[in-house]
Each structure stands twice: as structure tokens, then as C-alpha cells.
Image (cartoon, rainbow, N blue to C red):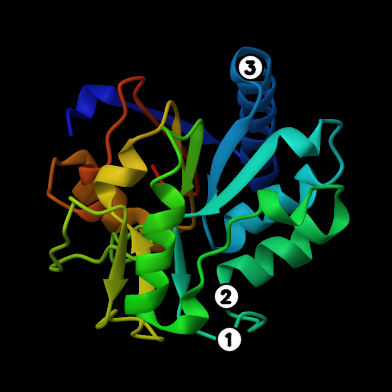
Amino acid sequence: MNLKQIKWQSFKSQASLNQAALEKIIALAELSIKTRGQFHIVLAGGSTPKKVYTMLKNIKTNWHKWQIYFGDERCLDSDHKDRNSTMAFEAWLNHIDIPMQNIHAIPAELGPVEGAHLYNQTLSQVDDFDLVLLGLGEDAHTASLFPGHSWDNNVDALAVFDAPKPPPLRISLSSARLSRSKSILFLVSGKEKQTAINQWKAGDLIPASTITCNNGVDVFCFNVS
């Protein structure tokens, strides 16, 4: 990634980061619905996105125009508390008037191979996303793309068998598919992420640096510099 394409923005509090993320999502949703009639958003897991999802349930929008996807998922039962989709439903999606057919959860309960195969079929019907939300792990992973791993960028969804964090079986969108978006926003909070941020800013090849966007990549940071 060309580091000049990254737009770093630091916030003085978690609340101000959350509010800025909320306002960006709302603005992109309004623009997308106005220009193409729908808003295609990819969700991330993690505590920082969860705070934003909790805020999203209170906004005024036409939820029928939203299409929800996920950047990665753990291969657990569909209602398991550790799934990204479960978190999104509990924090946000259960509280709004959105058609269930607009929520495209990864069928990871079927296992990494079958789940990835079916999600590839789903994504084959989808053009570029309007917004991809991502986080950054302490080890510099994003979605379920981990340092030291290789992945096939010729497919949209990947089977992951050896994630270094439990559970080892996961499904992740490839960096190429995550990059097919009009906007990309990383939400990064916590001093424990500083090493990963330093690697990124130094131009090291980490999973996050493989995700690009013609409009640039936004990175909202709190408690890291």
C-alpha cells in the first residue's frame, strides 16, 4: 500500500472516535442510497465496532436500503456468543427494522470449506462495497488475515484452518475482496495496538497494509499514535 493513501486521524477520547465513525457511516449511507438506491456495508468484529453498532441502532435511515455483510467469522454455532454476527445482532441488528434477507451472515457453522464456498456464491452477486469496516489486532491481523499466512486473492471468501487465536477455524474475506470498496475505515483503539501501528507506518508488510482503496484508507485511532 502507498502510505500516502492512508488518512490517519487521532482522537482524544473513545467517545469522539465513536462519534466520528458514526457520522462517517451515516454520511456514506445517505450518499449511497441517494446515488445507487442501496448501501452495502461490511462489518468488523471487536469491542470498538460494537460501540458504534450500539449507536447505529438509534439513527434515522431507511434500513430496507441497507445490505449487511461480514469481513470474517469464527466457525462456531450460528448463535454462539463469540461470533461476530451474534455481537452485531445483539448490539444493533435485533433493534432495527431491517429485512432478514438484507443481512448476509457468513455460514461459518458449516465449517470453513463449505461456509467459504457458500459465501463466495453470495458475494459473486455483489458489486463493490460502499464501506468496509475493519479492526487491527495486537499482532497486526485484520479480519481473519494473520501475519505470516498466505491467502488466495482470486477468491472472495477464504477458509482459514490455523488461526493463531482461538478458534483456529474461521472464514475471512480476502484482502482483494475487502479492497473492492468505495470506502475503507479501520477503527483502532488501545495502547496494545501501538506495535502494529508502528509496523504499518514503517511500511512493513502486514495484513492491514494489503488492503487498499482508490479513495484512500481511513484509520481512526485512539490511545495510539
**Where in the figure is residue 44, as x and y percent of width and height?**
52, 55
Residue 66 sits in which quadrant?
A: top right
Q: CA distance from mark 2 to mark 1?
A: 8 Å
Does label 2 or label 3 sit earlier along the sequence?
Answer: 3
Q: Residue at x 28, y 81 (%)?
A: 164
Position above or below: 44 against 30: below
- Which residue carries the number 3 mark? 31
Q: Residue at x 56, y 36 (%)?
A: 11
Q: Which mark is residue 77?
A: 1
- Does residue 3 appear to the left or right of 114 in the view shown? left
- Which residue carries the number 2 mark? 83
Q: CA distance from mark 1 to mark 3?
A: 36 Å
Q: CA distance from mark 2 to mark 3?
A: 30 Å
Whether pointer 2 and pointer 1 mark residues with C-beta atoms closer than 8 Å, the reply is: yes
Q: Residues within 10 Å of mark 1 (few under 14, many from 20)?
A: some
Does label 2 or label 1 sit earlier along the sequence?
Answer: 1
